[in-house]
Image: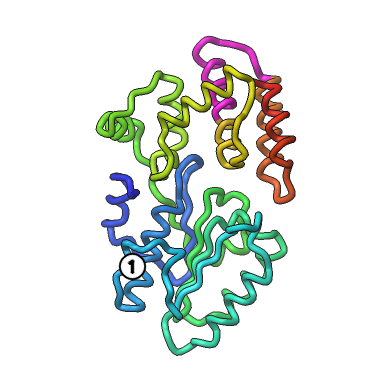
Amino acid sequence: MVLPWDKDFLSSETELSSRTILYASEGQNVNNISRSIVKKILGNIDSKDYSHLPLEEIASQNFIFLYPKDKSVIDIDQIRDSFKYLFLKSNSKRLLYLENIERVETRTFNTLLKFSEEADKNMIICMATNNINIVPETILSRFQKLKIPKPSNEIVKEHLINIGLNFDEQKNDFVLENLNLLSEEDKNINELFLKFDEYEAKKEIATKDKEEIRLFLDYQIHKIKFNMLKVKSNNKGKLEELRELRKQILMPHNLSIDILKSKLCLYI
C-alpha cells in the first residue's frame, strides 16, 4: 500500500543518478517507496509495466534484487555473484537493487564498493536503508543520497481519521513515530495493539514472530518515554536496559527468540 504522502513523492519526478541510496527517518518504511521507484526504473529498461507485481516475482534478465530473505545478512557471495552476472550484460541497461543495506556484512561493503566502481554507467545500482548512519562513509561519498520526506504529524493524523483509526494519545504518538505500521497491508494496527495489551496483562509474549517482538519492545520503550514526559515518571534505569536489549536484537548474531522473550517479560 502506497501512502498519500509517498504518492506525492513518487509523482515529483525526482532525478536519480546511476548510483543512489534511498533512506528515510527512523520509523518510516523506506522499502515500500523504494520498490515503487525500482519497478518504475526497471519498467523503463524493459518497456514493461511492473507496477502491480511484487518485486520478488519480477523475472527480468536485466534485474537482480538482493535482500536478507532467510539470512540475517547480505553476504559477500551474494554481492559477488550478482555483479558477475550483470557484468556479462554490459551492452544493455540493467539494475541491481539492494534492500536493507544496513544488513550487509561490514567486510562485504568493500566488495560492494569495488564492484560498483568497476561497473559502467549502463548498470544502475540502487540501495535502500532504514539506517543510513551505519553505512560506511566510503559508500556514502560515492552514491547520491536521497531522503524520503517524512510527513507532518498533522497530515498523518488526518490520514488516521480518514481510515477510521482512533487511539489514545500514547498509542497515537507511537504510530506517529512508526509510520511503517501504516504501510504494511498485512498488519492491522488495532489488532496489534490488542495483542500488546494482552501481552502486558498476562506478562507473556505469545508469538515467535521476531519482528513483532521487536515492535513490542519498541512499544515498551515508547511507553516509558511517553510517561516520563507526560506524568514525570522516573524510569531511566528501565529505559536504558530496554534500549540495550534492543541493541542486542539488531546484532547479526543476536539472541534466540526464547531468551529474548524471557528477558523482555521481566520489564512488562
Closer to the camera in the image, 3 or 258 = 258
Work out whether 104 lies above or below 7: below
Q: Which of the 4 quarters of the picture holds residue 55?
A: bottom left
Q: Residue at x 32, y 45 (%)?
A: 3
What residue is pinned by disc 1? Answer: 50
Closer to the camera in the image, 41 or 12 = 41
Question: Which segment did they paint magenta?
Answer: 219-236
Quadrant including the C terminus: top right
Closer to the camera in the image, 137 or 122 = 122
Q: Which of the 4 quarters of the picture holds residue 208?
A: top right
**Amino acid type indicated by mark 1:** Tyr
Q: How many marks?
A: 1
Q: Along the horizontal axis of the image, is 16 left or right of 83? A: left
Q: Along the horizontal axis of the image, is 213 left or right of 241? A: left
Q: Position of residue 5 (x, y in %)?
A: 31, 45
Say what secondary structure mark 1 lies in: loop
Indicate whether residue 153 is drawn in magenta. no
Q: Position of residue 148 (x, y in %)?
A: 41, 50
Q: Position of residue 141 (x, y in %)?
A: 56, 63
The majority secondary structure of the magenta stretch comes to: helix
